[in-house]
Amino acid sequence: MEEIRRGKLYEDIAEKVALLIERGILAPGDRIPSIRDMSRDLGVSINTVKESYWYLENKNYIEAVPQSGYYVRHQAQKRIDTPHEPDLNPREVSLCRIYSAFKEKGGCGPSTELGVALVANSLWPSGKLYRYFQEALRQHNNEALDYCMVPGLRQLREQIALYLVRSGLSVAPNDIIITSGCSEAIFLALSSICAPGDTVVVESPCYFNLLLLCERLNLQVVEVPLAPEGMHLETLEFVLDTYPVKAVISIPSFQNPTGILMSDTKKERLVRILESREIPLIEDEVYSEIHYSAKSPIACKSFDRTGNVLFCSSFSKTIAPGMRVGWIVPGKYYRDIEELKNLVNLGTPALAQMAIARYLADGSHERHLKKLRGQLERYMKEMRGAVLEHFPEGTRVSEPQGGFVLWVEMPQKVDSLRLYHEMLEHNIILAPGSMFSMNSKFNNYMRLNAGNWNRQIHDLVALIGARVKEMAAAE
């Protein structure tokens, strides 16, 4: 839209109409508002609107049809509303926003899902959910469409309390607050505990949306490296003794992006270190139920004796991401979280809560999880094997025992941010390693989503691998 510049009033109006055309809101052949209607709606003179339309006509955006009005030209230059070039920098904007832009233009599929952590929709229990949505609407139509205020639907909180037993937790329904996904649970926890300028500790590498959230809340972030069994606790103790830390955030089970599982011994020690200093632990356990061994990992919260651990999770990774039903067990911070959740959005939609409560109660989730774990374990092995086959010598790939993301270390010469931008030209979204740190680390790393696997994805991995080989071999 370089040819249309802001300045005079008629140019400003022309810019607004041109933007609607470029974004596809006004499609070729659509009639645009009449001169009289536009004059009335914008509170400007008819002559000003006429000048705007003549200007657009000269720029080939619209054409006049005698006795009918103005229409969008069929040959009008139009572009899809993807983020503009600066916004394609994943350090500045979440990959989720970039993924959404591709989705709007119908471009989502295996090539875009490599960079976003989600399970293939073929693995969602869609049929069961459809049935329970119908039942909830049929049996409780008014209640299903009414507010379901904090702390959330009692039946769902009861089912979650039963569900959490496998993670070593003994909580009552009244200890749980339903949230709109795990992300909101973490937002509520951070916002309740911290004020702008406060310091928080995260793992390094760290889930990129968490870093963006801390930045948005104006929090100071200190990164503590990961050891083979989770956060390096000796470094953590040094940080706690050096900085006025207000909270520590951890993904102890199948950490994103590394897939590391913190040992039970280390989990208990982490809880005790923070308990002795009265520093809260925000525990993100969204991946804990996607384990490939027979037993669910024990949560840090299971070692909590003082209510110092805020346990956050959701069904987004195990049922379907769009359900946006999560929860938080906030311990001694319950009242603050309850009040803030009420202020933010009053509650999570009742219909989704009802459907999931019924789905959990009839045992469907247990059967679904067994199938899901088997499929995802196979996908992870297939993708890991393909990366090792097609990427250059020296490439190392994580081998998690749960979750569905792989952390790929490539040869030092490979700049994953450059690779990311090159792959975007092929409509392929990757998650470059630099996104997972505030300190420009992990430049030769990337995270791959293994939540789906088929021949097309194999070919994409081979294509990426070929380019990585070229970059690694370059002088």
Image (cartoon, rainbow, N blue to C red):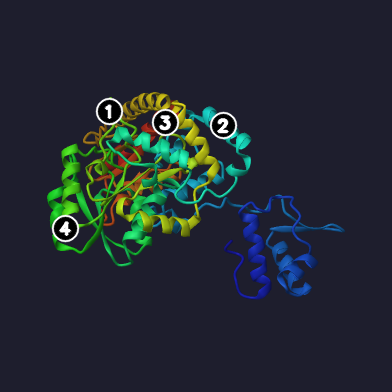
Instruction: Tell me the CA gap for discs 3 and 4.
Output: 39 Å
Residue corresponding to mark 4: 239
Marks 4, 1: nearer the viewer = 1
Towards the viewer: 436 or 313: 313
Quadrant in the rendering for residue 255: top left
Crowding at mark 4 (Cα within 10 Å: few <14, some 14-19, many 20+)? some
Of label 2 and label 3, which has the lower sequence position?
A: 2
Residue corresponding to mark 3: 452
- Residue 199 in the image: state x and y as whole percent: 26, 62
- Residue 237 in the image: state x and y as whole percent: 14, 54
Instruction: Tell me the CA gap for discs 2 and 1.
Output: 30 Å
- Residue 187 in the image: state x and y as whole percent: 38, 55
Q: Quadrant of the C terminus?
A: top left
Marks 2, 3: nearer the viewer = 2
Residue corresponding to mark 1: 295
Of label 4 and label 1, which has the lower sequence position?
A: 4
Kind of residue at disc 2: Tyr
Left or right, residue 155 beside residue 32: left
